[in-house]
Amino acid sequence: GDSLSKRMRRLAPVRSGSGLAGNAQQRGVLASGDKHLAVGCRVSLIWRLGKESCKGKLTSFSPQSGKFTVKFDDGRTEALLLERQRFLWHSPRACSAGYRPVLHSLMQQLGAEGVGPLPRVGEDGRVVPETAG
């Protein structure tokens, strides 16, 4: 069968310096030694011009290859360079649920779509909503 990563390479644009979110190296990605911090995060890989996605969990990171292993909810597993994929990060909403500013920064630097500026976290560990003003 056709593996997910092969379909995604064929159907999704690969990031480049002028592409979707810019080249991850130009955005100052944390050292490979820090990327392991993303293990355990939930993500959705996006393909077919944003009309299809597949949710999964980052289960490991290989410093040698720079690839994350993603175990998808349907049971499949793929090793992928996240910097070259279109993906969303399913961020926990509070520190007690696993939110950490370092994860936010890492996902932003890896190129996760929709990850904005680092939010403020209140004393209770919850993300403080933006206020219009």
Image (cartoon, rainbow, N blue to C red):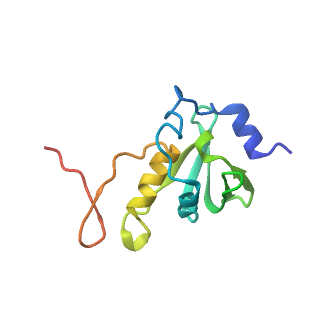
Residue 126 figure quarter: bottom left
**Horizontal relation, residue 70 to residue 132: left or right:** right
Residue 65, position in %: x, y?
A: 71, 51
> Which residue is at the front of the view, 19 or 43?
19
| Residue found 53% across the figure and 35% down from its top | 23
| Residue found 73% across the figure and 53% down from its top | 78
Residue reaching furthest left?
133
Residue 52 figure quarter: top right
> Which residue is at the front of the view, 46 or 15?
15
Residue reaching furthest top?
18
Residue reaching furthest right?
1
Residue 83, position in %: x, y?
A: 59, 43
Residue 107, position in %: x, y?
A: 48, 51
Figure check: 114 above or below 19: below
| Residue found 56% across the figure and 57% down from its top | 35
Quadrant of the image for the C terminus? top left
Residue 32 figure quarter: bottom right
Tally the numbered discs.
0
| Residue found 66% across the figure and 51% down from its top | 66
Figure check: 26 above or below 125: above
